[in-house]
Image: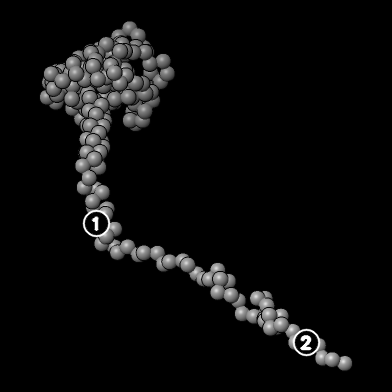
């Protein structure tokens, strides 16, 4: 039997799947990532300094600072409005307009340390067993006008123990709204002691702002 003819050389070449991967396949798995650039610290600091030195940034910061200062001054003015109007009469009209806009009330300043009870008495009425009359003089010792305070009357027994306490407001006393510098206000008020009138042996009178 005659031998078969030799096979062509092309049929004996290795296939693409059997051997090593091609160059194109190797290139497909190559890592093409690059490392990030690390910026030095002095460069970051220089960039921040340059930002804060910009004219627009400086103008904005100046406006914010000015707004905060004005807001703080306005808050202090509102809080101390009574003292400002009392110490500086020329500013009173401006303070009144400010309070009209902000819906605040302008009143005489309250300084209880400047108010003293100059004299007082608590006398029993002649023809009324429960009737008494309170007489008092209230003085402003400061150099500026202050608000008229209220008075607290405490009746005590022979052991100086309180029997009755009563708060007397300015309207009930018939006193003015404010006391001028160095001014002494004097007044009298009839009172009825319904309970414990027979035990009343003394009294205490204290000025305060309610």
The image position of residue 127, as x and y in percent, is 33, 7
| Residue matched to label 2 | 5
Q: Which image quarter: residue 86? A: top left
Q: Residue at 15% across / 20% down in the picture?
A: 91
Q: Are marks 2 and 1 in contact (CB under 8 Å)?
A: no
Q: Residue at x 38, y 23 (%)?
A: 164
Q: Disc 1 designates what residue? A: 46
Query: Depth check: 158 or 205 in front?
Result: 205
Position of 168 relative to 19 (above/below): above
Q: From where the camera sits, is residue 173 visible?
A: yes
Say whether residue 97 is left or right of residue 28. Answer: left
Q: Position of residue 132 (x, y in %)?
A: 31, 13
Name the mark nearer the viewer: 2 or 1: 2
The residue sitting at 82% across, 91% down in the picture is 3
Q: Residue furthest top?
A: 127
Residue sitting nearer the eye, 63 or 119:
63
The percent position of residue 158, horizontal first and vertical second, equals 33, 28
Q: Quadrant of residue 58?
A: top left
Residue 45 appears in which quarter of the rendering?
Answer: bottom left
Spatial CA span between label 2 and label 1:
83 Å
């Amino acid at each position: 039997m005659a031998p078969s003819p030799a096979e062509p050389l092309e049929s004996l070449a290795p296939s693409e799947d059997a051997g090593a991967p091609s160059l194109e396949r190797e290139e497909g798995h190559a890592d093409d990532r690059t490392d990030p650039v690390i910026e030095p610290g002095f460069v970051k600091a220089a960039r921040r300094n340059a930002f804060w030195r910009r004219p627009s940034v400086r103008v904005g910061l100046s406006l914010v600072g000015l707004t905060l200062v004005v807001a703080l001054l306005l808050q202090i003015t509102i809080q101390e409005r009574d003292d400002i109007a009392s110490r500086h009469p020329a500013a009173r009209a401006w303070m009144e307009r400010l309070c009209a806009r902000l819906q605040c009330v302008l009143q005489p300043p309250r300084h209880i340390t400047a108010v003293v009870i100059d004299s007082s008495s608590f006398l029993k009425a002649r023809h009324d067993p429960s009737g008494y009359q309170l007489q008092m003089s209230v003085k402003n010792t400061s150099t500026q006008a202050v608000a008229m305070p209220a008075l607290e009357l405490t009746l005590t027994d022979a052991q100086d123990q309180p029997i009755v306490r009563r708060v007397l407001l300015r309207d009930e006393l018939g006193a003015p709204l404010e006391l001028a510098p160095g001014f002494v206000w004097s007044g009298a008020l009839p009172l009825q002691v319904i309970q414990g009138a027979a035990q009343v042996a003394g009294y205490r009178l204290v000025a305060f702002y309610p």
